Image (cartoon, rainbow, N blue to C red):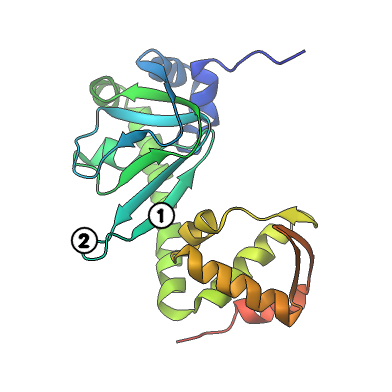
């Protein structure tokens, strides 16, 4: 027997942006939300558009990307999966989308209405404080990523990522190269190249997209090197 689908408030409660929010605030957000189906390849929003709301992924996945103005090359910034908010900063800073978003597979989004969200932030100070604290923690992580990008090569950042994921148990399935690249601040091609380097060196043993063994000591040493 399949489990009952989550209510809108339950979906919002699982979103990291709103985690541990009071029940009355969750219900208020659910009251200004609506679900919309998405199909693979469908545009969620385009760079330069004004936000009409804050989308949360209920089912499926959404990629956020930018295109190089000179070459047209696509750079994936992030891939958002169930319960992630998509480009959440735009819903709070009053600006336009700096990137575009597209559905990677059929799924469903829960859209929190923009005007309704603005009203709730005006009338519910606890909600505003919660969002500020959550975004502040994300900013701290972003500063850490900038430090890594500035002072470490991709292979060193990849080693740190693999070491972190391996702590949850081995074997484990790798995320897509695009998703890993978005997390590390690089491009999928460099993730692929450096995974191959780690595999051929024996530091990581791969079977397809599954990591079946790692040399934790070697990964740790590589992760703490300074490449620049």
Give the x, y percent position of residue 133: 40, 43
Give x and y (percent) for residue 172: 75, 54
Res 125 label: none
User: Please, is residue 12 above or below residue 206 in the view?
Assistant: above
Q: Mark 2 points at which residue?
A: 69
Q: Residue at x 72, y 15 (%)?
A: 2
Q: Residue at x 66, y 13 (%)?
A: 4
Image location of residue 19, percent across then percent down: 52, 33
CA separation, marks 2 and 1?
15 Å
User: Residue 177's x, y, as percent?
Assistant: 55, 59
Q: In this view, does 28 lie above or below 190?
A: above
Q: Mark 1 points at which residue?
A: 76
Q: In this view, does 155 lie to the left or right of 187?
A: right
Q: How many labels does the image show?
A: 2
Q: Label 2 crowding class (10 Å Cα cut-off): few <14, some 14-19, many 20+?
A: few
| Quarter of the view holding residue 85 | top left
Q: Which residue is drawn at 43% across and 45% down?
A: 63
Q: Is residue 156 above or below residue 207?
A: below
Q: Can residue 87 be seen in this view?
A: no
The secondary structure type at the circle numbered 2 is: loop
Which one is nearer the viewer's eye here, 107 or 146? 107
Of tags 2 and 1, the one toward the viewer is 2
Q: Tell whether 107 sits left or right of 128.
A: right
The mark nearer the N terminus, 2 or 1, is: 2
């Amino acid at each position: 027997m399949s489990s009952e689908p989550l209510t809108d408030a339950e979906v919002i409660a699982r979103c990291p942006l709103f985690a541990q929010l009071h029940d009355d605030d969750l219900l208020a957000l659910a009251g200004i939300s609506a679900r919309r189906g998405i199909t693979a390849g469908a545009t969620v929003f385009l760079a330069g558009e004004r936000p009409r709301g804050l989308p949360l992924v209920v089912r499926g996945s959404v990629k956020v990307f930018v295109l190089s103005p000179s070459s047209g090359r696509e750079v994936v910034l992030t891939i958002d999966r169930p319960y992630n908010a998509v480009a959440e900063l735009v819903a709070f800073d009053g600006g336009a989308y700096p990137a575009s978003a597209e559905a990677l597979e059929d799924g469903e989004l829960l859209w929190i209405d923009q005007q309704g969200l603005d009203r709730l932030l005006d009338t519910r100070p606890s909600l505003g404080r919660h969002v500020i604290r959550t975004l502040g923690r994300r900013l701290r992580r972003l500063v850490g990523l900038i430090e890594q990008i500035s002072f470490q090569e991709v292979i060193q950042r990849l080693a740190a990522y693999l070491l972190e994921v391996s702590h949850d148990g081995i074997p484990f399935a790798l995320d897509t190269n695009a998703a890993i690249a978005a997390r590390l601040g690089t491009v999928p091609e460099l993730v692929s190249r450096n995974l191959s380097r780690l595999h051929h060196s024996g530091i990581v043993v791969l079977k397809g997209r599954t990591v079946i063994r790692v040399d934790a000591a070697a990964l740790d040493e590589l992760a703490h090197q300074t490449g620049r």
